Amino acid sequence: MPLAGYFFLVTCIFAYTMIANVFERPDGVIISAIFIFLVLLLSGLSRYARSRELRVADVVLWNAESQQLWAEIAGRNVNLVPFQSSGAASRSAKAAEIRAEYKTSGPMDFLNVHLLDNRSEFLARLRLLVRREEQNYVIDVWGAVAVANTIAYISELIDPKSIFLVLSQQNLMSQGLDYLLWGEREIGLMVYTILVRYWELTKKPEPHPKLYLLTC
């Protein structure tokens, strides 16, 4: 008999023993199932309760240019536009669209958030690269564990005049589950929820940034 056959035989014996013990003494399986269920339930409730926190430990600016430009955009000097795009043409078109439809002045600050592959960490250490693009700015963020929380955190740091958030218009239940598990999906409503909760907890004085929820 080849070696693989012996391993298969031993596996079958262990499987039979486990099944026989489960049928004869089911108490252990029941207790284990209850324990696992409670752990998962408490973990889910804890993650839900903390999902509206900012979830950022600290921020590191990429280079000296980023530090200089960061000083220019902070303090109600820009309009924050979270926008997942790497093309200058698409950002320019979005800026023209916003200026045509809304009464807004000042440069746009396009924020592009890159998530970590491993999002099990609750707190993130963000790395920011800031650059000029014509009259606007672009901030690339690396190391995030959730998009909406990162947008809210950056917004509180730079204190923009307004924030333009796009609604995905998809099923809210599935989006809520995806956000809870992976930190993605409905960004606009979550940023709004996080910021309002943060302002209430910190009693931050007005004026707050104007929030625009776009449908497309």
Image: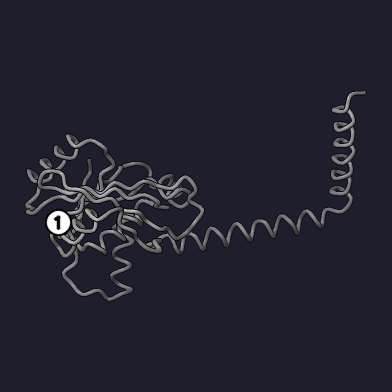
The location of residue 50, given as percent across then percent down, is: 45, 63
**Would residue 21 be found to the left or right of residue 100 on screen?**
right
Q: Residue at x 19, y 51 (%)?
A: 109
Q: Number of marks in the image?
A: 1
The picture quadrant where one finds residue 209 is bottom left
Identity, as a three-letter code, of the amino acid under mark 1 = Val
The location of residue 215, given as percent across then percent down, is: 23, 43
- Of all residues, the one furthest to the right in this rendering is 1
The picture quadrant where one finds residue 1 is top right
The location of residue 125, given as percent across then percent down, is: 40, 58
Question: Which residue corresponds to mark 1?
Answer: 78
- Of all residues, the one furthest to the top in this rendering is 1
Instruction: Identify the image quadrant of the C terminus.
Output: top left
Nearer to us in this view, 88 or 178? 88
Q: Residue at x 63, y 60 (%)?
A: 39
Nearer to us in this view, 140 or 186? 140
Q: Residue at x 32, y 50 (%)?
A: 141
